[in-house]
Image: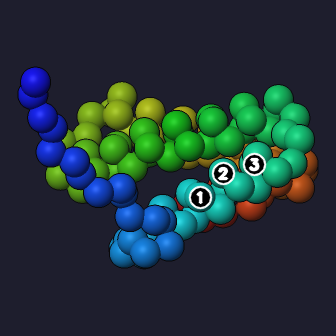
Amino acid sequence: MATRELTGAPERAEHMVTEPLSPAAAAAVRRLELALSLPVAPNVVRAVTQYEAAAVHAQELAALAASGRMSDLDADSLAAAEDLMAASRVALAAAGQLHLIEAAS
């Protein structure tokens, strides 16, 4: 008969040492908490999603511009992303939900 080495039970959560969340992670957790604690209208979800996707795209294009390799098409895409971010911000302000993107701004 084979024997197994017994291991101790995992430590309890209150005894474990963890690193504090980065400011960005803490803000993301807060946005998630706020989003989950309130019923959110579909237009608000759409505006947040569009804002976040456009912000990532704008950041990528800004890095391309900084490298000096931006084409005219890329510049148009950057302008469109910034326009979408602005429109999403207006929609969220009208819904009283700017807090969902404030940390990302």
Label 3: which secondary element: helix
Q: Earlier in the sequence, mark 1 or mark 3?
A: 1
Verify CB contact (< 8 Å) between mark 1 and mark 3: no
Question: Which image quarter holds the C terminus?
Answer: bottom right
Q: Position of residue 76 (x, y in %)?
A: 44, 34
On residue 35, the disc is 3
Whether 2 is drawn above or below 53: the answer is: above
Alpha-carbon distance for marks 2 and 3?
5 Å
Task: Locate residue 57: give its quadrant.
Answer: top left
Q: Residue furthest front?
A: 1
For badge 1, the amino acid type reads Val
Local packing at callout 3 (Cα closer than 10 Å; few below 14, some 14-19, many 20+) is some
For badge 3, the amino acid type reads Ala
Question: Which image quarter holds the N terminus?
Answer: top left
Residue that carries the numbered disc 2 in the rendered image: 32
Residue placed at 82% from the left, 44% from the top?
Answer: 91
Whether 14 is drawn above or below 56: the answer is: below
Verify CB contact (< 8 Å) between mark 1 and mark 2: yes
Q: Is residue 13 left or right of residue 105?
A: left
Q: Position of residue 20 (x, y in %)?
A: 42, 75
Local packing at callout 1 (Cα closer than 10 Å; few below 14, some 14-19, many 20+) is few
For badge 2, the amino acid type reads Leu
Is residue 52 visible in the rendered structure shown here? yes
Q: Position of residue 48 (x, y in %)?
A: 68, 42
Residue that carries the numbered disc 1 in the rendered image: 29
